[in-house]
Amino acid sequence: MSGTSATPLSRDEILAVLDTVMDPEVPVLSVRELGIVRDVSVDAGGAVVVTVTPTYSGCPAIRVIEQDIESALHEAGIADVRIQTVYSPAWTSDWIPAEARAKLKAYGIAPPSPSVTGDLVQLLRAPRTPQCPYCDSRDTEVRSEFGSTACKSICWCRSCGQPFEEFKGI
Amino acid sequence: MTTPSVVPVPGPPPNDEVELLLRLGDDRLVLGHRLSEWCGHAPILEEDIALANVALDLLGQATLFLRRAGAVEGKGRDEDALAYFREAVEFRNCLLVEQPNGDFGFTIARQFLFDVHAVVTLDALSRSTNAEIAALAAKSLKEAKYHVRHSGEWMLKLGDGTDESHRRVQRALDELWRFTPELFVADGVAARLAVQGVAPDLPALRAQWETIVRDVVDRATLTLPHESMHSPHLRGGRTGMHSEHLGHMLAEMQIVARSHPGAKW
């Protein structure tokens, strides 16, 4: 954070507040753990600027997330909050750190595999077998690339017979 | 016979960047709306969810491209003004995406042909000399790769499925094939943008597109339609000459916004 500001909180304190703002659709992860919050700064007018990068273009949760960020900072005593959206670099599930992946797995959602790169012909030929978050088996199949939210697919474990969701790797 | 002299067109010169952004945005807006028509009607619940999810992604991408188009155009039009208050002749989408849904096989075939086109186009655009376009393309590309995995899987399931599913998806491919040359036509706008490095050389992308399409079509035990299935007449979407289907679709899509201009919900 640069410049002088009327905000009563330090940068670390602001980030700590943002750690309490959970994703509305994956409530075990904060907006920071998901990598949606890219930066926090103070602009010339003294407003706290939170820079966010949306996950999916059509994710209906992004407006709720922005409102939740504003509300949390207002409650922490910061009156002037501005959300700034940046699209580059594009959001990737690779930004989700190891601790957050463990939380996803404990919640019953298979963590994302590395984002898709390389030749498209090969991509379309390679079957995906996400690791079952319940029994760790790889004997699984993707039943549908799209699940209850934009960021998840629906899978099935042949070993333990449990359906599960996978956080998509993009 | 004498060569006609070139008469300068009056009015401001067309803005190639705006045209490109409208093409990208309108392809996604129109196809996203078509897919949303499946909501509540898809053959199985998972597909109802999947088609609605793809529709949402496409509408989200359309929002980004159209918002940028409005900003570059500089006439104060935002993405909603462009989506709801333009006439069919002002839309720049390709004819492929405005075709009615037909049966599930037809929708999947249309989607697959578009998804592969989206991936190769967005991949090239992510290296555009225009930083804004490159950023939006890189973001959309990640989603497009997911979309093509979905539609590609269904091409395999339907093509290599029952006699009935094979017959229907083959018929869809045959019917839709004539709309695919338009995707790679380099008109003046596309050619000028290619020279500047803003957009890719479209004819060169065609081979890349066909390699991917052919691989899936072959594995799906389907037959890639012959070149003779192309018709030279089925293009014009990029300059606003659409099939009759777009107007009907827009009537439904635009009625609420036009009946209540300025309304917020």
Image (cartoon, coloured by chain):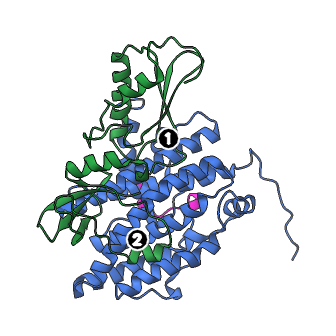
Which residue is found at the position 44% from the left and 61% from the top? B144
Q: Which residue is mark 2?
A: B112
The label number, if any, that marks residue B240 in the structure image = none
B77 vs A71: above or below = below
Q: Chain of mark 1?
A: B
Question: In the rendering, at what x and y percent does residue A111 appear?
Answer: 30, 55
Question: In the rendering, at what x and y percent does residue A7 appear?
Answer: 47, 14
The shade of chain A is green
Which residue is found at the position 33% from the left and 17% from the top? A75
Q: Nearer the viewer, residue B86 or A39?
A: A39
Q: Nearer the viewer, residue B188 or A45?
A: A45
Say which quadrant the N terminus of chain B sits in.
bottom right
B158 vs B149: above or below = below
Residue type, label 2: Phe
Q: Chain of mark 2?
A: B
Our reading of the magenta stretch's main secondary structure is helix
The label number, if any, that marks residue B79 in the structure image = 1
Q: Chain in blue?
A: B
Q: Determine crowd level at label 2: few under 14, some 14-19, many 20+ residues with C-alpha closer than 10 A.
A: many
Q: Nearer the viewer, residue A104 or B23?
A: A104
Q: Hey, which quadrant is residue B24 in on the image?
A: bottom right
The residues colored magenta run: B238-247
Q: Determine crowd level at label 1: few under 14, some 14-19, many 20+ residues with C-alpha closer than 10 A.
A: many
> Relative to residue B21, is residue B252 drawn left or right?
left
* Both labels 1 and 2 in a single chain: yes
